[in-house]
Image (tube, rainbow, N blue to C red):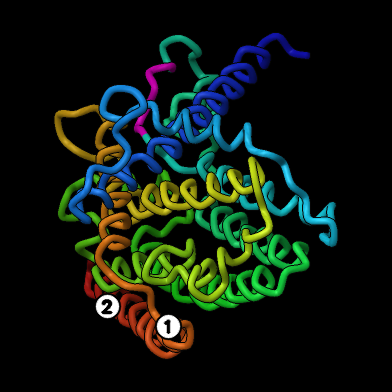
Amino acid sequence: MDQGLVIPALLVVVKVLLLLGAVLTFVAYATLLERRVLGFIQVRLGPNRVGPWGLLQPLADGAKLLLKEEVTVSQATKPVYLVAPLIVVVCALVPFGVIPFAKGLGLESILGPMADRFSLNTGVISDVNVGILLIFAISSLGAYGVLLGGWSSNNKYSLLGGVRAGAQMISYELALSLSVLGVLLLAGSLSLVDIVEAQDKVWKWYIFRQPLGFLLFLIAGAAEIGRTPFDLLECENELVAGYQTEYSSMKFGLFYLGEYAHLLFLSALVTTLFLGGWQGPILPPAVWFLGKMFLFAFFFIWVRGTYPRLRYDRVMKFGWKVLLPVGLFNVMVTALVYTIYLQHGG
């Protein structure tokens, strides 16, 4: 192997491991954040016994899941039953690799031209020129994990939860994709780094230039990851626990991990597409990115503690009869205004 490639390759591996460790840590503490915020909303304390201010609660929860009895349903289709949670987790974690969380890492003085050649100086694992397409392609595969988990359990409630999940995810993916098209038209690129760099001033943030697309993205994104009020795929008063009813121990924990990883990923993607990503004055870029990301994570938690669950038929009608036409309208108006702007010397 070329010795000049060894150090960059090792640095890429280190970046991947650091990112994975950071994401898993954030996911663990997102569970604590949600429980404490919901406790505050409901005028109670939330978890506060394990460690100072309850900060070690995620470690206790992880240990509890690892030590619980591992049960596999006797009538389950075992290979699919075991693989389904892994599909959900992988599809939730892999897209983080193309999310740009900082402008630069200061490695150009150490590595010279190799830093740019191997994208080692950017705060992103891989600056793919079709990053947004890669994200949608991988994230949409997560629906298979939920569907297969519900089907392979040989439980009618799990199956119904999986079917609901598949129908809901497919329905709201259309509105989610349409909400992003306006941003792509204005940025002129599918690269997430280019999209962030196009928002170099606060007034250029796409939340101001695409307010309708932003609202569509928030609503469709919440439905896509099954957050309240769209959490019909695990509706306990109808389906016990939905697609994950027959899962226990760490297999259940993987579904749980995937759910919160999706929450953080959606918050990171909203930050990247509509709130300027790492852009901001004075503070380091990574601090701006994390601050914006956790602002949206708090928003989704606040919505969960505020709004009741919708009825399933209304969820489906809302996706097809409201969000889809509004998304098409937003794309057409954006394309028309942008074309007129270009024709008149913009």
Badge 2 element: helix
65 displayed left or right of 50: right
Position of 68 relative to 177 (above/below): above
- Of the pair 319 and 73, the residue shown nearer to us: 73
Task: State which quadrant residue 241 falls in.
Answer: bottom right
> Residue 337 got which mark?
2
Residue 251, position in %: x, y?
Answer: 66, 45
Which residue is found at the position 75% from the left and 62% from the top? 153
Comparing labels 2 and 1, the label whose residue is closer to the camera: 1
- The residue nearer to you, when weighing 202 against 271, is 271
Q: Which residue is mark 1?
A: 311
Q: Residues within 10 Å of mark 1 (few under 14, many from 20)?
A: few
Please state the extent of the stretch shown in magenta in the rendering: 102-107
Residue 125 horizontal side relative to residue 39, left or right: right
Residue 176 horizontal/vertical position (percent):
45, 69
Q: Amino acid under label 2?
A: Val
